[in-house]
Each structure stands twice: as structure tokens, then as C-alpha cells.
């Protein structure tokens, strides 16, 4: 063991021979003796210090590069999101314009159909009048022909009687016959003229009726195209809303019935169309028109329901980060979603409703509770400032508070909760369901 120590000491003396550091002053000269062990300790300490500095610099550099890449990626994602939003907004506006134009064309077509139907009804009335006139003429002809036959019979009997009658009687009878024949001839001529006039009038009416029938068929084809465009436009607008409610787990039939009961006032614009005034069954166009009106009514009900359910996000700025989601956290259930942004960021109501609480609440800090339709309640916690009062009615997108760090909180953020019939549910279910709709 002593030999090993001596070898190590000799190696240390060869690598780090003893050094003396001279310090000269006016009073004299002094020196400091640097042993091999002291030199080893100094070199080792310097090496460790330099190594730690290099490692720390590398870590800081890598972290800076990584943060820069994340910021660039975030900016690119934001630009793509904004571009998609603009595209969706443009598509929505285009569909709304197409629907408005189709509605205008539909109204024009309905007016034309009404005019054509009035003309058809008038033509039908004229046709019935012609039929009645022709029946009257035929009845008159039959009566006249009967009278003619009776007159012929009378003339035969008179001819037989003439053979045995005297000249004075014959002259009197001849005069009566001539008067009768003249009257019959005048009646027959007048009846024939009326018959010819009625026949011409009936032929002209038939031609007009055929022309109106052709125009009606063309109008039916045009109406069919208009109805098709309207049905497509309504379907394109209605399908995303229906998918949104179903994705959020909300029964659409029950939702529509609830809204319909709450908005059941009469006299609105969407009144079923009916062209029949005699209690007859509606034609195909009327049934299709009523179907479109029903779909437009459902579209309006969906729009009202979407305003009253929490489909929106509580913050509108793109400079935010979701720091904690719904579910287990730290051994307990986190009943909401946390969104972190700059201090004072505006917080907005996610649906129409009434404020039921606005004040301080223990771990929640400055808290706002809003009651909505369909059994929903939303909560916004850890605010810096409240901008609503209890009992106040708010609309979706209305600012209700400023983001803060009040209550039991580790940093500036908003704790957003959605409760359905008193039970906390995941808010992102509703936000994601409306992602491609609003």
C-alpha cells in the first residue's frame, strides 16, 4: 500500500511539479508554494467549471432553438386556422347568398304559379260556360226539329184536308202555313248562327287552353329546378347543425321540440302554402314547398338552439394555451378546462343565458355562473374583474369578465366548466362539435 502511494505521489510530482509564485513589493519579495496536490485540485476545479459552463450553454441554446421552432409552428398553425376560418366564412356567406337568391326565385315562381292557376281556373269557368251554351243550343235544336216534325205532320194532314176544302179555306190555310214556315226558317237560321259562333268560340278557347297547358308544363319544369336548388341549399345548411348537436350528444328531436314550444307565437313568415280553396288534396309543388318551409323552420330552430347551448369558446384570442383538460388530475377530478393567456384577456359567454352568481367563491376566486336552456350551466373562475351582475341576461359572445389569477390558482388562466343538469361534463365536447360550423 505504501509503495502504491509512493508511485502515485511520484506520478503527481512529474505531471504537476512543485511551483512557486513570487510576489515582489517595495518591502521585499515573497512567494507562494503550489504543491502538486493543490495544482491538481485547481486544474480539476477549473475543468469542471468550464465543462459545466459549456453544458449549460448548450442546454440554453437547444431550448432557445426548440422554443423558436414551437413559435414558428404556432404562427403557421394560426395562419392556417385563420385561412380556414376565412374560407369557411366565405363559403357560409356564399351559401347564404345562394339561399337568398333561391328564395327570391322561389317567391317569383310562386307568384307566377298563382297567376297561371288563376288563368286556368278562369279558362275552366269559360269552358263550363261554353258547354252549358252548347247544351242549350242542342236542346233548342232538338226542340226546333221536333216542332219541324210536328209542322210536317200538320202540313201532311193539311194537304189531305186541302184536297177536299173550298178555295177560300185553302187561301187562309196557305197564308197561315207561309207565316209558320217563315217563323221556323228565321228561328232555324238564328240557331244555326249561334251554333257556329259557339263552335268558333269553343275552338278558340281550346287553343288558348292548350297554350296555357304548355306554359304550365314549362313553368312546372322551372319550378322543379328552383325547388331542387332550394332543397339542396337547405340541406347543406341544415346537415352541419344536425351533426353538431349529435356530436355533442344532444337529442335533436327533443331540442327542436323544446325550442318550438318556447317560440310558438303565431303570425310568423313560415306559414304552410296551400293553393286549394275547396279542401282538396295539395298538389306536388305545394307539398314540396311545405317541405322546404318545414326544413327552413328547423334551420331557424337549430340557430336558436345553438345560441342557447355552450358551443362557443370562452376566449376569442389566438394567443392562448390549454393548460389542463377535463378529467383526473392530482388524485381528483378536474371538472373543467383551463385556458391560459395574458392577464386581463376578455372572457366571453359561450351561450345565451342569465347570470345566477357573480362574486367571490373560495377556491374559484372571482366566479361567474350562467344558467342556460336545456339544463346547462357554465362557470368561469379565477377572474381578475367581473363585468356582469346577478340576474343580468347575457348573449353568446358578450364579455362577462377579465382573465386573472384569483382564488386557488398557479397562474393567470380561466377555469371553464360546463354542467348538464348539475353534472360536470367535458367542455371540449361542445367546442369541438361546433369547430367546423361557426
Image (cartoon, rainbow, N blue to C red):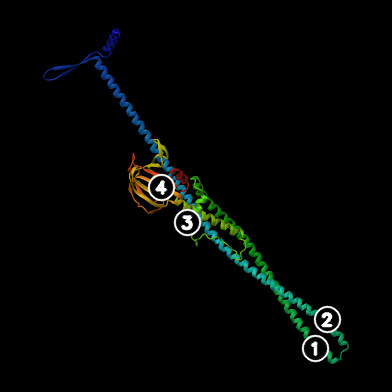
Q: Nearer the viewer, mark 4 or mark 1?
A: 4
Q: Nearer the viewer, mark 2 or mark 3?
A: 3
Asked if residue 161 lies left or right of residue 275, the reply is right
Lower sequence index among marks 1 and 3: 1
Lower sequence index among marks 4 and 1: 1
| Quadrant, the N terminus | top left
Asked if residue 190 lies left or right of residue 375, the reply is right
Residue 309 percent location from the top left of the image? 45, 49
Residue 109 percent location from the top left of the image? 56, 61
**SS label for mark 2:** helix
What is the CA distance from the residue labelled 2 to the residue labelled 3?
86 Å
Lower sequence index among marks 2 and 4: 2
Residue at mark 1: 175
Q: Are marks 2 and 4 in contact (CB under 8 Å)?
A: no
**SS label for mark 1:** helix
Between residues 3 and 378, which one lies in front from this camera angle? 378
Lower sequence index among marks 3 and 4: 3
What is the CA distance from the residue labelled 4 to the residue labelled 1?
112 Å
Residue sitting at x 54%, y 51%: 235
Q: Which mark is residue 153?
A: 2
Q: How many C-alpha atoms fall within 10 Å of the one at disc 1: few (<14), some, or many (≥20)?
A: few
Residue at mark 3: 262
Residue at mark 4: 378
Asked if residue 199 lies left or right of residue 37, the reply is right
Amino acid at each position: 500500500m505504501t509503495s502504491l502511494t509512493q508511485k502515485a505521489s511520484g506520478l503527481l510530482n512529474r505531471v504537476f511539479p512543485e511551483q512557486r509564485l513570487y510576489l515582489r513589493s517595495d518591502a521585499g519579495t515573497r512567494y507562494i508554494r503550489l504543491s502538486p496536490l493543490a495544482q491538481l485540485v485547481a486544474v480539476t476545479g477549473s475543468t469542471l467549471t468550464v465543462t459545466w459552463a459549456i453544458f449549460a450553454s448548450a442546454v440554453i441554446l437547444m431550448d432557445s432553438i426548440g422554443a423558436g421552432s414551437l413559435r414558428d409552428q404556432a404562427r403557421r398553425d394560426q395562419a392556417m386556422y385563420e385561412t380556414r376560418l376565412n374560407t369557411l366564412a366565405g363559403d357560409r356567406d356564399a351559401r347564404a347568398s345562394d339561399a337568398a337568391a333561391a328564395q327570391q326565385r322561389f317567391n317569383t315562381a310562386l307568384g307566377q304559379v298563382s297567376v297561371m292557376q288563376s288563368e286556368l281556373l278562369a279558362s275552366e269557368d269559360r269552358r263550363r260556360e261554353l258547354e252549358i251554351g252548347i247544351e242549350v243550343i242542342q236542346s233548342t235544336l232538338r226542340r226546333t226539329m221536333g216542332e219541324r216534325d210536328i209542322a210536317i205532320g200538320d202540313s201532311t194532314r193539311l194537304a189531305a184536308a186541302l184536297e177536299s176544302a173550298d178555295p177560300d179555306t185553302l187561301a187562309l190555310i196557305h197564308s197561315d202555313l207561309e207565316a209558320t214556315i217563315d217563323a221556323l226558317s228565321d228561328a232555324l237560321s238564328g240557331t244555326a248562327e249561334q251554333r257556329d259562333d259557339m263552335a268558333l268560340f269553343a275552338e278558340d278557347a281550346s287553343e288558348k287552353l292548350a297554350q296555357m297547358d304548355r306554359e304550365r308544363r314549362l313553368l312546372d319544369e322551372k319550378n322543379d329546378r328552383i325547388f331542387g336548388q332550394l332543397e339542396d341549399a337547405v340541406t347543406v345548411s341544415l346537415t352541419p347543425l344536425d351533426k353538431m348537436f349529435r356530436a355533442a350528444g344532444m337529442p335533436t328531436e327533443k331540442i327542436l321540440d323544446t325550442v318550438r314550444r318556447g317560440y310558438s307565437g303565431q303570425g310568423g313568415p313560415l306559414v304552410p302554402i296551400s293553393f286549394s280553396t275547396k279542401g282538396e288534396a295539395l298538389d306536388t309543388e305545394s307539398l314540396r314547398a311545405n317541405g322546404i318551409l318545414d326544413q327552413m323552420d328547423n334551420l331557424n330552430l337549430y340557430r336558436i338552439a345553438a345560441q342557447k347551448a355552450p358551443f362557443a369558446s370562452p376566449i376569442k384570442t389566438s394567443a392562448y394555451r390549454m393548460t389542463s383538460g377535463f378529467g383526473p388530475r392530482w388524485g381528483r377530478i378536474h371538472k373543467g378546462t383551463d385556458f391560459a393567456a395574458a392577464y386581463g384577456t376578455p372572457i366571453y359567454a359561450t351561450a345565451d343565458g342569465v347570470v345566477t352568481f357573480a362574486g367571490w367563491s373560495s377556491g374559484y376566486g372571482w366566479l361567474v355562473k350562467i344558467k342556460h336552456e336545456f339544463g346547462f350551466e357554465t362557470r368561469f373562475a379565477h377572474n381578475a374583474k367581473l363585468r356582469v351582475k346577478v340576474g343580468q341576461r347575457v348573449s353568446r359572445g358578450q364579455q362577462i369578465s377579465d382573465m386573472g389569477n384569483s382564488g386557488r390558482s398557479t397562474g393567470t388562466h380561466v377555469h371553464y366548466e360546463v354542467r348538464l343538469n348539475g353534472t360536470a361534463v367535458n367542455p371540449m365536447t361542445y367546442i369541438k362539435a361546433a369547430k367546423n360550423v361557426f
